[in-house]
Image: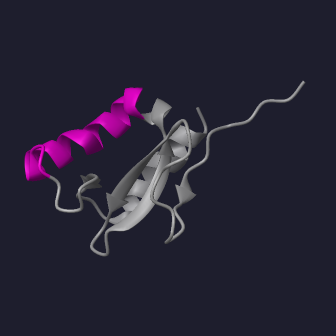
Amino acid sequence: MGFRLPVIKRASKGAEIPPKGFLAVYVGDNMRRFLIPISYLNQPTFQDLLSQSEEEFGYSHPTGGLTIPCKEDVFLNVTSRLNGL
């Protein structure tokens, strides 16, 4: 019996609706779109990123989606650690 770990995905350019169980977020200076597992929202390290987003943008995000105001490499570092949980 196998199991699958959640993985972060770089969203393809044409994809508008995330697959079930994922959320689209925009990260970095270039506003790259990533798909993350919804389960990340409960993790304290990811909640820190969400707090930064709330402080900078409130509830009005310039992309119309969830924007996380950090460098892309910081985001990838946090999500890679969450991927191991």
Question: Which quadrant is home to the C terminus?
Answer: top right
What colour scheme has been applied to the protein in the rendered image?
one colour
Comparing 58 with 74, the one in front is 58
Horizontal and vertical percent position of residue 83: 58, 41
Q: Main secondary structure of the magenta part?
A: helix
- Within the image, what quadrant is residue 47 found in? top left
- Within the image, what quadrant is residue 16 found in? bottom left
Q: Residue furthest bottom?
A: 30
Comparing 12 with 41, the one in front is 12
Above or below, 28 relative to 21: below
Q: Residue at x 33, y 61 (%)?
A: 27
Comparing 15 with 67, the one in front is 15
Q: Residue furthest right?
A: 1
Question: Which quadrant is home to the N terminus?
Answer: top right
Question: Across the whole image, how many numbered discs are drawn on residues?
Answer: 0
Q: Is residue 53 toward the left or the right of residue 81 in the image?
A: left
Horizontal and vertical percent position of residue 30: 31, 75
Q: Is residue 74 toward the left or the right of residue 57 in the image?
A: right
Horizontal and vertical percent position of residue 55: 9, 45
Q: Residue at x 49, y 49 (%)?
A: 18
Q: Is residue 56 toward the left or the right of residue 17 in the image?
A: left
Does the magenta portion include 50?
yes
Above or below, 77 relative to 38: below
Above or below, 13 relative to 85: below
Does the magenta portion include 59?
yes
Q: Residue at x 36, y 39 (%)?
A: 46
Above or below, 75 relative to 22: below
Comparing 40 with 77, the one in front is 40
Bounds of the magenta segment = 41-60
Q: Residue at x 54, y 35 (%)?
A: 21
Horizontal and vertical percent position of residue 62: 17, 61
